[in-house]
Amino acid sequence: MAVGLSACAASGQSYADLERDQTDQDRLPVSTPGGGSDDPLAIDADSTRLVAVQGDTEIFLASATEQGQPRICIIVFAATEPFRACGDGDQVTLSDSVNRYTVLSDAAVDTQLDPDEGWTKISENVFTRPVEPTTSDTQ
């Protein structure tokens, strides 16, 4: 049975990606980072949504709480180990060795990141672009 969810997360921000009913595909794999007894972040398992797939990489959004405060989390399952970033503002950003991911709340998404800077919208609230090589990467 799918469970509906209010699309509110961090500090009252809303996220269109969280508005639809959850399906089995939206559930996080068992290997999700964190969630142990020593992790101060509690991801709401009923809020998780698979928002994009890029090659072998799956990108999820979820609501969470940290010390009683609401958070929005982006969780990325790439070829290596899964990783996450959470925050309470209109924007949360996370990078791996290949891509940078930015989550924008519904209030900020209309200020979309500039496509001329390489940003691509991959869901209602998530944008990505390739990580720019550093000077040491190009020498």
Image (cartoon, rainbow, N blue to C red):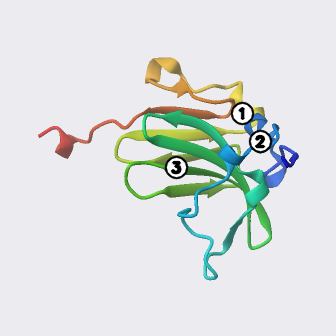
Q: Is residue 124 left or right of residue 138?
A: right
User: Which numbered disc, 1 or 3, marks the residue closer to the eye?
Assistant: 3
Q: Position of residue 12 (x, y in %)?
A: 85, 49
Q: Position of residue 106 (x, y in %)?
A: 76, 34
The mark found on residue 74 in the picture is none
Is the C-beta separation of discs 2 and 1 under 8 Å? no
Residue occupying the far top of the picture: 116
| Secondary structure of residue under mark 3 | strand
User: Which numbered disc, 2 or 1, marks the residue closer to the eye?
Assistant: 2
Image point (46%, 17%), residue name: 116
Q: CA distance from mark 2 to mark 3?
A: 16 Å
Is the C-beta separation of discs 1 and 3 under 8 Å? no
Residue designated by label 2: 18
Residue designated by label 1: 108
Amino acid type, label 2: Leu
| Secondary structure of residue under mark 2 | helix
| Secondary structure of residue under mark 1 | helix
Residue 17 position (above or below residue 47): above
Q: CA distance from mark 2 to mark 1?
A: 15 Å
Image point (81%, 41%), residue name: 14
Residue designated by label 3: 76
Locate the C terminus by quadrant.
top left
Q: Position of residue 86 (x, y in %)?
A: 62, 56
Comes first in the chain, label 2 or label 1: 2
Q: Position of residue 91 (x, y in %)?
A: 64, 43
